[in-house]
């Protein structure tokens, strides 16, 4: 067990666990109102998601004995954080909880193994074939559920909770707010609407989603409401420095060699918008015995090139498929390009999967970039 989890205080569910009553805090929040926006909606999601939709979802959850949770494949902090936070709350409400993601290789990324409530996770094979109530988190399409897309297809009710603008709403009910900084923002609101409290473990899960999806409050999705949510979460007593270190300030030494190889072959194409790109092969990682999950941060170094509006990193996974990460400084909508290539995401951070060689994939991407 990691230092972060150990330091998070008492074991989960302990009566001495610091808790925050969302409703109590919000009841006295009128002093925080500003700019005509009520801070009672942590995300401002009430403007986007109707009261009726919230009520219907709360009703579905209250009625269910078992809730099956699924997030997108190759889960990130927001996907796992939102799913585990909701899982903990549902468990406390007395529900049977199943939580999973539909990867053939069912492994939690090492960076996220410090998250509390890993015990709620089970492999996709153990997921109910036709759940009574399934809730998907941070997944913009049915395909992003991987192996669990079939379970969603057979479920009686599928509630889609997400913040991707490319999400067309594939379930029977949808709580989708593209203005939310992370899916965790919507989950916090849902927890509040269920009348439940945010314990330090729940707060840790929500905080990890919030900081990973906002790039530590650097991206444009960051608003006053984002910081207000962070303040509520930090007030539960979670170990901020330990979480930051676990997420960003560590990597096996082998990462440095793989990073060096990727940076050594980075290309800057100055024409048009300016494009910087590189790739990391399975062989690069094999040479250093570095797992795929460790290379997620390469894009954050590559995209720093001042001359480029757009950055691309192609990452060959263990199956030989290319997971392509794309970033834009704002002038180009990379979600539109990635959607056209079968992926999705946000205007400034998006991705897709390619089964073509690097040069073919880049030719396709370049072509769409030229037209955008
Ligand atoms: P990443 O580059 O993996 O950090 O992903 C950036 C954004 O693109 C995230 O919002 C992802 O959900 C989205 N994304 C990444 N890969 C895919 C994919 N294969 N299909 C759809 N969306 C993706
Ligand atoms: Mn995600
Ligand atoms: Mn997200």
Image (cartoon, grey):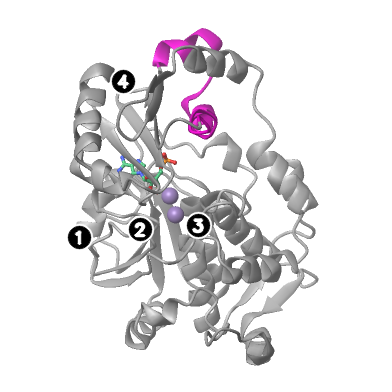
Task: Compare marks 4 and 1 and give the one earlier in the sequence.
Answer: 1
**Foreground: disc 4 or disc 1:** 4
The stretch drawn in magenta includes residue 135 = no
Label 2 C-beta lies within 8 Å of the nearest ligand 1 atom? yes
Read off the magenta span.
281-305
In the rendered image, which quarter contains the C terminus? top left
Which residue matches tag 1? 154
In the rendered image, which quarter contains the N terminus? top right
Which residue matches tag 3? 220
Which residue matches tag 4? 320
Label 4 – label 2 distance at C-alpha: 27 Å
Task: Compare marks 3 and 1 and give the one earlier in the sequence.
Answer: 1
From the viewer's side, name the closer residue of 9 and 274. 274
**Foreground: disc 1 or disc 2:** 2
Which residue matches tag 2? 164
Q: Residue at x 77, y 73 (%)?
A: 15
**Foreground: disc 4 or disc 2:** 2
Label 4 – label 3 distance at C-alpha: 33 Å
Label 1 C-beta lies within 8 Å of the nearest ligand 1 atom? no
Crowding at mark 2 (Cα within 10 Å: few <14, some 14-19, many 20+): many
Label 3 – label 2 distance at C-alpha: 14 Å
Task: Compare marks 4 and 2 and give the one earlier in the sequence.
Answer: 2
Q: What secondary structure prevails in the magenta region?
A: helix
């Amino acid at each position: 067990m990691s230092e972060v989890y150990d330091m998070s205080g008492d074991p989960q569910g302990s009566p001495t666990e610091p808790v925050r009553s969302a409703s109590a805090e919000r009841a006295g929040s009128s002093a925080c109102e500003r700019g005509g926006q009520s801070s009672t909606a942590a995300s401002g999601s009430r403007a986007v998601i109707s009261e009726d939709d919230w009520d219907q979802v709360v009703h579905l959850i209250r009625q269910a004995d078992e809730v099956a949770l699924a997030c997108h494949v190759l889960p990130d902090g927001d996907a796992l954080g939102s799913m585990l936070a909701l899982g903990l709350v549902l468990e406390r409400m007395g529900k049977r909880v199943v939580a999973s993601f539909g990867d053939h290789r069912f492994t939690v990324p090492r960076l996220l193994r410090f998250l509390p409530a890993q015990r709620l996770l089970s492999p996709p094979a153990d997921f109910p074939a036709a759940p009574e109530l399934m809730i998907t988190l941070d997944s913009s399409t049915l395909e992003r559920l991987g192996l669990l897309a079939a379970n969603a297809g057979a479920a009686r009710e599928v509630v889609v909770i997400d913040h991707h603008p490319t999400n067309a709403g594939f379930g029977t009910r949808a709580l989708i707010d593209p203005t939310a900084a992370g899916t965790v923002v919507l989950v916090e609101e849902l927890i509040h609407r269920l009348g439940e409290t945010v314990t330090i473990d729940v707060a840790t899960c929500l905080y990890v989603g919030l900081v990973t999806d906002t790039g530590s409050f650097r991206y444009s999705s960051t608003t006053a409401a984002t910081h207000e949510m962070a303040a509520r979460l930090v007030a539960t007593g979670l170990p901020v420095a330990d979480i930051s270190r676990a997420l960003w300030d560590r990597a096996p030494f082998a990462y440095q060699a793989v990073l060096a190889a990727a940076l050594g072959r980075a290309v800057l194409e100055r024409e048009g918008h300016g494009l910087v790109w590189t790739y990391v092969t399975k062989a690069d990682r094999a040479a250093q015995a570095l797992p795929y999950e460790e290379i997620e941060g390469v894009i954050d170094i590559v995209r720093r090139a001042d001359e480029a509006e757009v950055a691309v990193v192609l990452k060959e996974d263990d199956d030989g498929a290319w997971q392509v990460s794309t970033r834009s400084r704002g002038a180009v909508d990379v979600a539109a390009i990635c959607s056209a290539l079968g992926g999705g995401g946000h205007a400034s951070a998006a991705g897709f999967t390619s089964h073509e060689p690097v040069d073919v994939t880049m030719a396709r991407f370049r072509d769409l970039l030229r037209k955008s």
